[in-house]
Amino acid sequence: MKKDDIRRTVRARKSLLTENEKAEAAQSVFDRLEQMAAFMMADRILMYHSLPDELSTRDFLGKWSERKHFFLPRVNGVNLDILPYEQTRLHLGAFEIEEPDGNDLTDIADIELIIVPAVAYDRHGNRVGRGKGYYDRMLAGSRATKVGVGYDFQLIDDAIDTDSHDVPVDIVITQSHTVIRRR
C-alpha cells in the first residue's frame, strides 16, 4: 500500500476521534506497554512528546519519570539529537513539538528501548512516518528494542511499501493488538 494513501486515510480516521476516545486509547496502549518485559527490564527509554493527533505520552511520562530514565528527541537539521527528559526543561521546537533544552546529548547506543511514533504500521513492523525520515536515520544506528504504538486503525493488514532506508519496529502495540515481528 502506498504511503501517501495510508497517511491520507489515517489522518481522516484520527479527525473523527473524540478527546475521550483519544485518552482511553492512550491509557490502553500504555497499560499494555507497561506489562511487556522489554519495558520492565529497560531503564533508558527514548519516548516521543506527542502531537495532538498522536497517542498522548504526557501521562505516561509523568507516571514513570521518577522510576525510569526517559529521553526525548530534538530536531537538529535533518537528524534527531537525544536528550534527557525533564518536564521543566522543554521548549516548543521544530514542528510545534515540545523538545528538551540543553547540551547533554545521549548516544543512541545507550538507549535500551525506543517508543516510535508513526502514522501506521503493518504486521511485519514496517511503518509509515510523516515523510521526513528523522526516525529512520536515528533507528538505523540502534540495537534497542523498537516499539511502535498507535490506535487500532493504525495497524493495517496490507503490507506497507518500504524503501531500503526504512527501519521496522520489533513490536507494535494498539488498544487491542500486540504484534511481535519475527526476525
Image: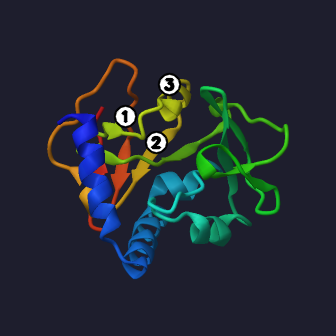
Q: Regarding mark 3 in the picture, which secondary structure is present there?
A: loop
Q: Regarding mark 1 in the picture, which secondary structure is present there?
A: loop
Is residue 151 in sight in this rendering?
yes
Q: In the rendered view, does 152 fall on the left or right side of 145?
A: left
Please give the residue where the numbered disc 3 appears in the rendered image.
140
Q: Is residue 122 above or below residue 167?
A: below
CB of mark 2 within 8 Å of CB of mark 1? yes
Mark sitting earlier along the chain (2/3): 3
Q: Amino acid at mark 1?
A: Pro
CB of mark 3 within 8 Å of CB of mark 1? no
Q: In the rendered view, does 159 fall on the left or right side of 80?
A: left
Please give the residue where the numbered disc 2 appears in the rendered image.
146
Q: Regarding mark 2 in the picture, which secondary structure is present there?
A: strand
Neighbour class for label 3 at 10 Å: few (<14), some, many (≥20)?
few
Out of 107 and 3, give the one closest to the viewer. 3
Quarter of the view holding residue 170: top left
Q: In the rendered view, does 131 fall on the left or right side of 5?
A: right
Please give the residue where the numbered disc 1 appears in the rendered image.
168
Gap between marks 3 and 1 measured at Cα: 10 Å
